[in-house]
Image (cartoon, rainbow, N blue to C red):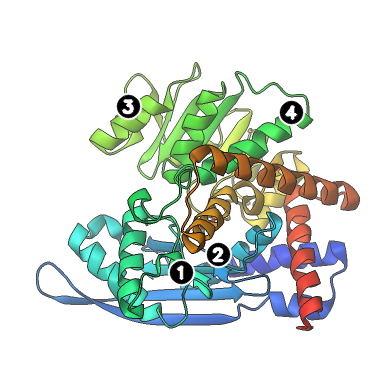
Amino acid sequence: MSLFENTLAQINEAAGIMQLDENIKEVISHPKKMLQVSVPVKMDDGKVKVFKGYRVQHSDVRGPCKGGIRYHWQVDIEEVKALATWMSMKCAVVNIPYGGGKGGVECNPKELSDAEMERLSRGYIDAISQIVGPELDIPAPDVYTNAQVMAWFADEFSKIKGKPSIGVVTGKPLEFGGSLGRNTATAQGGVYVLLKYLRDNDIDPKGLKVVVQGFGNAGMFGATILHKEGLKIIGVSDSKGGIYKEEGFDPNAVFDVKKSKGSVQDFEGVEKITNEELIEKDCDVLVLAALENQVHKDNAQNIKGKIILELANGPITPEGDEILVKNEIEVIPDILANAGGVTVSYFEWVQNLANFYWTEEEVQQKLKPIMEKALADVLTMKNKYRSSMRQAAFIVAIKRIEDTMKLRGIV
Ligand code: GLU
């Protein structure tokens, strides 16, 4: 099954439970617009290499399309379609006025120099410039793109338009229209949701054992924020492999080692394990913050975490999900758990349009209630339909998209 087929399976499941109008289902099962581009880049050795890029706009029913750009060697159109669809659902779950979009470039950023990255980024935004813009479709960072890449996008797009147009992307550096709190937002939003969930269930977070797969923006901040909240980080990993220590360790120290030496596995005094072993470790909270399809039909049975927080998009396949639900493992789904990132992107965009900037405290004060309300809305649906949290999150999102579609006369 392709990733987009996984997404359709999730939509179908939710549609069945909520008895969704077939017309609505038909519309949301198709991305509205898909663009494929070829981006020629002059490499440092003088040769020209052509990179394949995509931008998919799944829906603009509730507002401009919104979603990140991924640089990865496995990017393909089916993946980008899935990620764009999840963005529409995610923005609707947290009830921010956006539709969903996603972009990707098939490349290996680890093999590109900074100058090549810059030329590729400028070339890509040039190639999609007709369909993006502050009122149309607003990209942001995703896997292997960061604030610097967003700065190049915003600079190039402003040149094309002949005027400052920095609201075209979010996740920019603070010195160039970024928002305080955007860097930590995906992780922080997930932590707000998790802590509220624990409070509601009378579980004391202090000392809970946590395993985090992935040590990029979401996983690294996820680990450090949870550590600060008093939970015990016993395992983390990056693409090279994982580390484990039952007594726990300080993820800040792991971050320092990764920064200077290249991998979490260079951290000393811990057991070195594979990514596969890591996610099967016994723990209270398993945070999935790497790539998609990490838990599937062949390993779901071995998962021992009691609660799973999906900071990555699509880390569990539908077959894997079914097994976890049977085993009564509570999965806080991606479209809820990692929606803090796009929520603070929304704040950044609002600040750009108003040209008035908020303090970090203001950002957190606005983020927390949005995340907690989204959790409450999802739990209400979960109780109403006796469904999983993922199904409930899809139902909340689809219902909101449906209401707007009907009001607008789209169906
Ligand atoms: N790439 C992030 C996501 O998957 C952020 C998107 C955004 O900020 O627009 O949610």
The tag earlier along the polypeptide, 3 or 1, is: 1
Residue 99, how many percent across, how many down? 62, 69
Query: In terms of secondary structure, where does tag 1 sit?
Result: strand
Q: In 3D space, how far apart are the residues under numbered discs 1 and 2 (Cα atoms)?
A: 9 Å
Query: In terms of secondary structure, where does tag 3 sit?
Result: loop
The tag earlier along the polypeptide, 3 or 4, is: 4
Disc 3 and disc 2 in contact, CB within 8 angstroms? no
Does the image show residue 237?
Answer: yes
Query: In terms of secondary structure, where does tag 4 sit?
Result: helix
Residue 90, how many percent across, how many down? 64, 58
Query: In terms of secondary structure, where does tag 2 sit?
Result: helix
The tag earlier along the polypeptide, 3 or 2, is: 2
Which one is in front in this view, the residue at disc 3 or the one at disc 4?
4
Q: Mark 4 points at which residue?
A: 199
Name the residue type under label 1. Gly
Q: Quick one: 304 or 195, which is closer to the camera?
A: 195
Is 291 on the left-hand or right-hand side of 49? Answer: right
Residue 154, how many percent across, how many down? 36, 66
Q: In 3D space, how far apart are the residues under numbered discs 3 and 2 (Cα atoms)?
A: 33 Å
Disc 1 and disc 2 in contact, CB within 8 angstroms? no
Q: In 3D space, how far apart are the residues under numbered discs 4 and 1 (Cα atoms)?
A: 37 Å
Q: Residue at x 84, y 70 (%)?
A: 20
Q: Name the residue under label 1.
A: 103
Q: Mark 2 points at which residue?
A: 83
Q: How crowded is mark 2: few (under 14 residues within 10 Å), some or many (20 or more)?
A: many
Q: Name the residue under label 3.
A: 267
Q: In 3D space, how far apart are the residues under numbered discs 3 and 1 (Cα atoms)?
A: 34 Å
Q: Which residue is drawn at 77% across and 65% down?
A: 400
The tag earlier along the polypeptide, 2 or 4, is: 2
Which one is in front in this view, the residue at disc 2 or the one at disc 4?
4
Which one is in front in this view, the residue at disc 3 or the one at disc 1?
1
- Residue 365 figure quarter: top right
